[in-house]
Each structure stands twice: as structure tokens, then as C-alpha cells.
Amino acid sequence: MSDRIKDLEPNKQSKGYYSVKSKKIKLTRANKEYIDLILEDQTGEINGKVWDNVEHLNPTFDEGDIVYVEGFVETYNDKNQLRVQKIRKPYEDEVDPSTILPSAEESPEKMWSKLQELIKKNVKNPFLLELLKRLLNKYEKKLKVWPGARKVHHSYLGGLLEHTLAVTEISEFLSKKYDLDKDLTITGAILHDIGKLEEIKSPTKKEETEKGVLLGHIIIGVQILKEESERIIGFPEDLLNRLTHLVISHHGNYEFGAYQLPMTKEALALHFADFIDSQMNIFENILKNHTGDSIATDYDYRIGRKLFTGEKE
């Protein structure tokens, strides 16, 4: 029986299986090493500290591993914190990782079906339809499990598909509202992050590939679009240029990683669809993992602020 993170109570012993979201070696004021952890499961995350036997335990597990943990739940700065007493990787077949790792709330199959319906409803251009068909067939297996990012947003199993679906749904609304090129906007929404499938090495450990480190997901996505479109006889160059522009500009600003500022209404719509879904996911995660009675969360570097949680009853 694994104690779920959201159910952990202060001043009680706990034991359970968790994923190591973050692992860092730090020093106490007395210059003694300790391991600072963020552990997570499907219900939330908790900070953990390994104070003893650090030299022996440190090489036995890595960031991204599933671990079995025994510890004592303490309170620090009005938040639960786990004093780790035992930690090890599970034995073979001891635990099913899919029951531990955070994942999208909706099933991959249901999200995939919704995405296919959006394509059927909105994309009529034969070249874009063929491009989507080829790429989604090629990457279906990965897209159903891949995280949306390593750490920032949608960083869990199925997160990339969840984010892609949401961005596409928002883009559909914006296309109707502002009379956009629906074929182009919807295709761009579905493919804007496709490079992440080659940027992130594994859906569980979420390490970067060599290509991911050196190029990043936007450039990888551009390469994927170019290579696949060249296999489609007669694919118009101007159509590829406009689609590529959506991919390279979807971060909106140079300081946020865009290679070009949005220069079309479709590109601007995609940028804001991507931005609102990523930010809402970050907000939801911060609020989900907030514990204690304070009316505000801790400061979060991703959004440069803390969030109001409301009065506790």
C-alpha cells in the first residue's frame, strides 16, 4: 500500500512509491551534504530531505527514477516536508510505474479521438490533411504518452497530447471569431510542438536528446515539417513557409524562444492559444500542490509571482 502525497499528514510515518521529479546535493550551514528532493505521484508533490547516509544513498537513484520511500512527515514554512529515512529503487515488477507517474486526467484514447474530430471538422486542404495524416500515424504511439515539457508545463505522461488538444480547441474558437485561415491555424496548433517528440528522450525520465540540447524543439519541428512535406508530391512552398512561420513564432517573443515574431493573424492566434494553455496549466499545478493554511502560494520562478489561494475555512 502506497501513501498518496495529498493524503500525507504531519507528524506521521509514511511509506510509498514516488517519482523523483528533482534531485540536488546541497550543503547545510555546517557544510554537511544532504539530498534535496521533490517527490511526486499522481496526487501531487512534496519536498523531501535525505540528511543521513548521503554518500551511500546518492549513487543509488537518479532524477526521474521511481523510488520506494519511508519517512516522517514534518512541517516547514507551513508546508508538508518528508524527512526521508529509507529510499531505494523498486525491485523488478514490484510496482507498476503507470500507477505512480503523474499523467493527464483524460485518457490518451479519448484525447486522440477528439483531435481526430477536430481535424475532420476543420482541415480541408489536401496537402495539410496528408501532412497531418503522415505525421500523426508516424508519432501516434509517442504522442499518446509524451510529456509536454521536462519541467515547466504539462510535464507528465500524456501532457503533450493534452496541451496539443487544448491549443487546437482554443485555435478553433479564435479561427471562427477572427475569420482566420482555419486549415492553417488548426494544422499549426496540432504540429507546433511536434519537435518535442525528438527533443525529450523518454516519457518517464524526460532527459534531453543530443538533438534536443543542440537544436531545441522548434528547430527540430521545422526539420520534421520540411522532411515530411518533401515526401508529398506538389506540396506548395508558400504553404510550407506559412506553416513553418507558425511553428517558429509560437513562443511570441524573442526572449521566450521565438525565432520570429508572429507576422500573421494565424501566428498571433496560435501564440496566444499556446500561451494561455501553458500558463493555466502552471497555475493549476501550483494551486494543486499548495498545502497549509496560507492564503498565498510560495513564489514560483516560472510565472514570477505567487498565487492567491483564498481564505481557508
Image: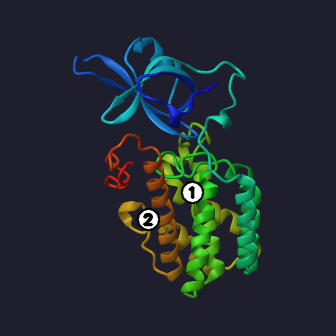
**Tag count:** 2
Q: Give 134 or 170, whichever is nearer the viewer.
A: 170
Quarter location, residue 202? top right
- 91 vs 40, left or right, is right
- Residue type indicated by callout 1: Ile
188 versus 70 height, above or below:
below
1 and 2 marks in contact (CB < 8 Å)? no
- Residue type indicated by callout 2: Ala
- 185 vs 94, left or right, is left
- 142 vs 74, left or right, is right
Q: Position of residue 292 (x, y in %)?
A: 37, 40
Quarter location, residue 162? bottom right
* Distance between the alpha carbons at the discs numbered 1 and 2: 13 Å
Residue 179 in view (yes/no): yes
How packed is label 2: few (under 14 Cα within 10 Å), some, or many (20 or more)?
A: some
What residue is shown at x 57% (from left), y 67% (from top)?
167
208 versus 140 height, above or below:
above
Residue beneath disc 1:
220
Residue beneath disc 2:
258
Q: Position of residue 270 (x, y in %)?
A: 53, 72
Secondary structure of residue under mark 2: loop
Q: Position of residue 24 (x, y in %)?
A: 39, 29
Q: Give 214 or 145, whichever is nearer the viewer.
A: 145
What residue is shown at x 75% (from left), y 70% (from top)?
117
Q: Position of residue 94 (x, y in %)?
A: 69, 22
Q: Give 299 or 155, whichever is nearer the viewer.
A: 299
N-terminal-most mark, 1 or 2: 1
75 versus 309 height, above or below:
above
25 versus 258 height, above or below:
above
